[in-house]
Amino acid sequence: MNTIWIVMPILIVLMFLLGMELNKDAFINVARHPKALVLGMTGQIILLPFIAFILAWVLNLPPVYFMGFVLVACCPGGSSSNVFSMLAKGDTALSVTLTAVSSIITLFTLPVIMEFTSYYVSHNAGISIELPIGKLLMQNIVLFFIPMLAGMFLRYKSPTRAAKVSSVLNKVAFPALMLLAFLFFLQYSQEIMDNFRIIGFACGMLIVTSMLCSSLLSRMGKLTNAVRHTIVIEVGMQNAAQAIAIATSPFIFNSGEMAIPAIIYALLMNVLLLLYIVKLKY
């Protein structure tokens, strides 16, 4: 069973939810916090993929995991980051804005970075890994951009109805993600267990390093604690479902093994960021 047919509806729901969360306050935040937006996007779009590539190179990850590891780092912030920002007493409106902006920007940056990564891996491993950029762009637009626009449109036309729909979908989204992770684990349990030590170590290093670097960036920018916590969470949390959709899509890589780093990353990022929130509270 190809997990893409489970990932697709979950992704559409998540992006639709994100669109419904975007109100005028989220857009005002772009003008209110330009420095925070720039620093957050620097960490998300540039720093995270760079660290992932270096770690994959230093650890000499096998080609398919090298690709999958960099892939999850190229994805936008995860929708759960908004909840985590709220728990950390961060700037929730800014979190929504950063997630939305990264979702749009990565439509274009992800193909560029993955094209370079596929060329590097193919050249050094002596294998051919092709990236159909046109199909990748089209899939991203259909699965991410259009549902987000639809959510924004529903909120604009009928805020009351959007609030009701959001309330229902919010209850469904997380269990659906857990179901996806469970089914994926069942399908690739042996590969995950065999490679958990090296990929888990790489994912843990990526999350911790990116959190430390984004915190340093925020301190250098003299941002408030609330904004700094938000940026750290945004950079640390990735849309792992998007990485799984790209890796397993029959139109792009069609590789379940390439999605394994995303599953392990999703598990570790929730654990490490929850520990981060606990540390902030105590």
Image: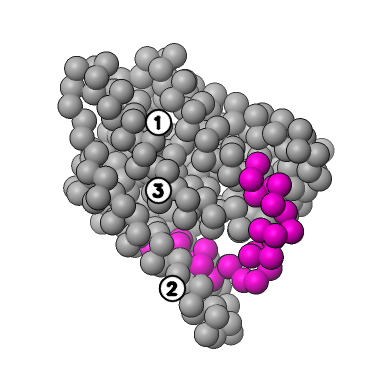
For label 2, the SS is helix
For label 3, the SS is helix
Q: Nearer the viewer, residue 271 or 144?
A: 144
Assess disc 1: are there few (<14), some (14-19) or many (≥20) residues with their C-alpha within 10 Å of its C-alpha.
Answer: many
Q: Is residue 18 magenta?
A: yes
Under mark 1, the amino acid is Phe
Query: Mark 3 or mark 2: which is in front?
Result: 3
At which x and y percent is residue 74? Answer: 44, 39
At which x and y percent is residue 56? Answer: 41, 21
In the picture of the structure, the residue carrying the numbered disc 3 is: 108
Question: Does 82 sit left or right of 77 as displayed?
Answer: right
Q: Are marks 3 and 1 in contact (CB under 8 Å)?
A: no
Residue drawn at x 27%, y 27% as measured from the top left:
119
Mark with earlier residue (3, 1): 1
Query: Mark 3 or mark 1: which is in front?
Result: 3
Q: Nearer the viewer, residue 33 or 268?
A: 33
